[in-house]
Structures are given as C-alpha cells and as structure tokens.
Image (spheres, grey):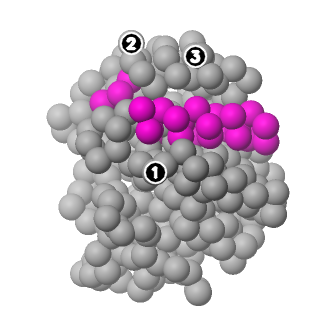
Amino acid sequence: MGIVTKPSSGSRWSVTQSRDDNSKNISKESPVPAPAIDSHAHLYFDRFNDDRDEVIQRAKDAGFVAIINIAVDEQTSRQVIQLAMENEGFCHAVVGVHPTHSGMSADDLKTTLAAVEKLCDEHPQQVVGIGEIGLDYYWKEVSPADQERAFIAQLDIARRRKLPVVIHCREAWPDTLAVIEKHGVGVTGVFHCFGGTVEEAQRALDLGWYVSFAGNLTYPKAQDLRDAAAIVPLDRLLLETDSPFLAPQPKRGKRNEPVHSLHTADQLAKVHGTDRKTVLEATTASSKKLFRLNS
C-alpha cells in the first residue's frame, strides 16, 4: 500500500515486524445486524503489513461502514491520511501527538504541531479529528509538564479547526479532566478505551463528551469497566478496538482487528439489557455525529 509502516522508534508504539500466526486464519464473524464503525484503530502498525487490505475487506464484508485510524505522532498522522486516501469514504484519519510522544522542546513541539495542523488544511476530506491526545502517567518517559503542554496546544488546534478530539487517559484522570475543564471550552470529543471509574465516567458525561469502550470490557476481571459502561447512555457510547491491541476475550492473546469489536458490542448489549443491533445503531450514529461522517 506504500505505507511507511514503522512508527517512531524508542517508544511503546514501536511494534515488531513479526507476523501474527493467526492473521490468515481468523474465523468469520457473525454478520452485523446493523452498520458498525470502529472508532479507534491503528491499522498502520507493522502487525498489519501482511494483510492490511484483507483486514479492511473483512470489516466491509461484516457490514462495517467506517474505520477511524488514530495517529500518535507527525509520521503516523501522515500514515492515517494515506490510509484514508487509499480507502476513500471508509477509512478516516485523526491526527495528533500522543502524550508518550510529546517529550520534546517547546520549539520542536511548535514545529511538530504546526505540521499536524497543516495536514488538517491539506486534507480536510480525510482528517476528522485531533488525537490521540491527553495524559499518560503509566509510562514515565515524558514528564507530566511536557504532556500537558502538548495536550493544551492540541485542544487549541481542535478549537480553531472545529474538530473533535480523541482523549488518551491512563492513570491521570484528575489532571486530564482538569485540563479539559479549564482549556477545553468549545471543544468536544471522546474518551477512548475508557478505563476509569463510574464517577469518572459521569464526569465525562457531565462535560457533554462521548465514552468509548474496547475489547478489555469483555475480560472476566473487568467488572468495574462494565459498571462504568452501564451508566453511559447508548447515545453517548462509541465502539472501538484500539487494534492491534486489546483483543476481546474470545480473541484474547491474538492481534485485534475491527471485526472483533462485535464482541465488545455484545458485551455492551448485555450491560444495557439490549441486543447487538441496538448497540450498533447507537454507536454508529454517535460516531457519525461526533466525527461528522457522511457514510
């Protein structure tokens, strides 16, 4: 596909180029009773090198109408745009700098974010959001101050461009919410791969934002996540994989891909006492509304 497949080295986002043994032997998922959208994937990762086109086709065959690929730095911002151009109307791009990639000088950050913002100008049909941005205190390589500086600057870009943001928050809920409350006026978005408490989910909802759940919602020990999902109204939910990470329980330990989000949809249906069709209708409508998709 002509995609530069190796994200920036020296971070948790650098992925080995080894091929997944099961990549050609994934059983076909059950047909989707309603159109679906994977609102958060990283299909530019090396682990999709051997079958990226097939992964996308499997999603189409299963009834998916869109995949939103999320960048983590300037290089991958260009990659998600390229994927969107090569899969016009189906793949969409979210561009930005992940908190674990924000450890740079003020001048370098300014240059990087100027390049990211320029991509928004150059590719308005492909770019549907800014992200993933936020705070990550689990990984210690980048100081909280550097992360916050990049976070605030990208909230400003989103406000100027009238684009939604995709929030990454790991072990940093109080500070993440505080930054959004202070600097996110006029900005909306989604808390991706939600990993907080019921109380934190409620604060996200109070901001008027969306909440997205990934395959870890299906894990046996994830009752706290299911409790949080239960308080999120269907019309504020998004569905995601975070591919290639966080495969749902039936696929756990294997590479994740968009069609596997149907297992997460089934878990959300159980939590809300409804069915897969209802969940897919709601999450697809929310994704279209948030990212202003026409598909």
User: What amino acid type is highlighted by mark number 3?
Assistant: Glu
Q: Quadrant of the C terminus?
A: bottom right
Q: Residue beneath label 1, please?
A: 104
How many residues crowd around disc 2 within 10 Å: few (fewer than 14), some, or many (20 or more)?
few
Q: Is residue 95 above or below residue 208?
A: below
Looking at the image, which is closer to me, 40 or 2?
A: 2
User: What amino acid type is highlighted by mark number 1?
Assistant: Met
**Where's residue 69, x and y in %?**
57, 59
Q: Quadrant of the N terminus?
A: bottom right
Query: Disc 3 to disc 1, how far (Cα)?
Result: 25 Å
Looking at the image, which is closer to me, 232 or 263?
A: 232
User: What amino acid type is highlighted by mark number 2?
Assistant: Glu
**Where's residue 109, x and y in %?**
56, 50
Q: Residue at x 52, y 22 (%)?
A: 179
How many residues crowd around disc 3 within 10 Å: few (fewer than 14), some, or many (20 or more)?
few
Residue 254 located within the stretch drawn in magenta: no
Nearest to viewer (mark 3 / mark 1):
1
Q: Are marks 1 and 2 in contact (CB under 8 Å)?
A: no
N-terminal of the two: label 1 or label 2? 1
Q: The magenta stretch spans which residues?
A: 145-173
Nearest to viewer (mark 1 / mark 2):
1
Q: Residue beneath label 3, please?
A: 181
Whether residue 90 sits left or right of residue 140 in the image: it is right
Which label sits on residue 92?
none
Whether residue 255 sits left or right of residue 189 in the image: it is left
Residue 252, quarter of picture: bottom left
